[in-house]
Image (cartoon, rainbow, N blue to C red):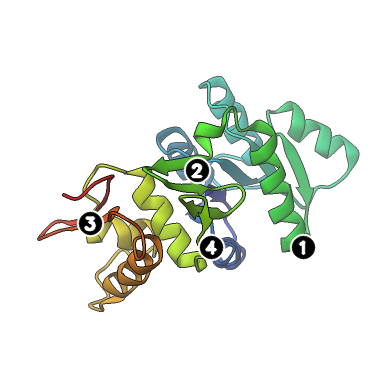
């Protein structure tokens, strides 16, 4: 899944990003309400995780505004305010779930997954297919010709991003920023290594390649040889 976390506590935000990515999800962070609103309106996310107390624009105002703009993405509100009235206020502002701090990561992850399952309007929004290759984001499962292909979390995120842009050239910069969250070139062959491992898993032993290298440009997932 692609998640937006709006949290001004940078240590808490870093922990959430690391834990969510280790769980196989793509996570973007905003540190204030205005930045969160801009990302929420501009990006395509499966779930928003929004802290209630934020600088520049508080979390409830953020949720209310995205609802006014017609964004129906599920929202999980996080807050140290955990009384019944606080939860009711958060839900009435447009939140779909409310989790009081402190919380366990396992519960937060379960609630995110439950929101995505409950509100996803159709299978097409959660399943990507190219040829006989299929990736189910909610089940965290990849198959080809009905055969399950086990992937490591980073490989899963890499394949998900490539499938989201199937038929398009995906550059190394796009992968560094969206799969590794690097906004600089680390001057390593990390992408080449992961692409090679992914290719061996999804292409080796099958009748035709789906993951192609576009020389001098990047990579592309498409059905059939280039």
User: Can you give x and y, in whole percent of width and height, for residue 180 in the image?
Assistant: 39, 65
Q: Nearer the viewer, mark 1 or mark 3?
A: 3
Which residue occupies the foreground of this view, 164 or 134?
134
- Decide: marks 1, 2 in contact (CB < 8 A)? no
**x 47%, y 60%: residue:** 156
The kind of secondary structure element at disc 1 is loop
Is the Cβ of the residue at disc 1 closer than 8 Å to that at disc 3?
Answer: no
Q: Quadrant of residue 197?
A: bottom left
- Tell me the distance, in whole angstroms, between the alpha carbons under discs 3 and 4: 25 Å
- What residue lies at 27% left-to-right and 46% top-to-bottom? 222
Give the mark toward the camera: 2 or 3: 3
**Secondary element at tag 3:** strand
109 with respect to 226 (left or right): right
> What is the x, y in percent for residue 221?
29, 50
- Measured Cα–Cα span from mark 1 to mark 3: 41 Å
Task: Find residue 15 and report its image quarter.
Answer: bottom right
Total numbered badges shown on the rendered structure: 4
Element type where label 2 sits in the image = helix
Q: Which residue is mark 4?
A: 21
Residue 29: x, y in percent?
49, 54
Q: Would residue 12 be seen by someone viewing this image from the given angle? A: yes
Badge 2 is on which residue? 36
Residue at (34% x, 51% y) in the render: 162
Residue lying farthest to the right in this orientation:
84
Identify the residue under disc 3.
212
- Give me the C-alpha separation between circle 2 and circle 3: 35 Å
């Amino acid at each position: 899944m692609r998640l937006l976390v709006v949290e001004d506590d940078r240590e808490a935000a870093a922990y959430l990003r690391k834990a969510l990515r280790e769980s196989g999800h793509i996570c973007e962070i905003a540190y204030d309400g205005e930045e969160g609103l801009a990302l929420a309106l501009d990006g395509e996310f499966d779930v928003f995780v929004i802290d209630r107390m934020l600088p520049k624009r508080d979390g409830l105002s953020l949720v209310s505004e995205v609802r006014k703009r017609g964004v129906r993405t599920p929202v999980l509100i996080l807050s140290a305010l955990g009384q019944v009235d606080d939860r009711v206020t958060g839900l009435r502002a447009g939140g779909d779930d409310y989790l009081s701090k402190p919380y366990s990561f396992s519960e937060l992850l379960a609630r995110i997954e439950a929101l995505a399952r409950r509100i996803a309007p159709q299978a097409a929004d959660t399943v990507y297919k190219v040829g006989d290759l299929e990736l189910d984001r909610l089940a965290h499962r990849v198959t080809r010709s009905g055969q399950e292909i086990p992937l490591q979390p980073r490989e899963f995120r890499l394949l998900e991003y490539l499938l989201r842009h199937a038929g398009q050239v995906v550059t190394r910069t796009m992968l560094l920023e969206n799969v590794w969250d690097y906004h600089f070139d680390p001057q390593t062959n990390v992408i080449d290594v992961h692409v090679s491992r992914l290719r061996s898993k999804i292409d080796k032993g099958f009748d035709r390649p789906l993951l192609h290298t576009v020389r001098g440009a990047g990579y592309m997932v498409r059905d059939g040889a280039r």
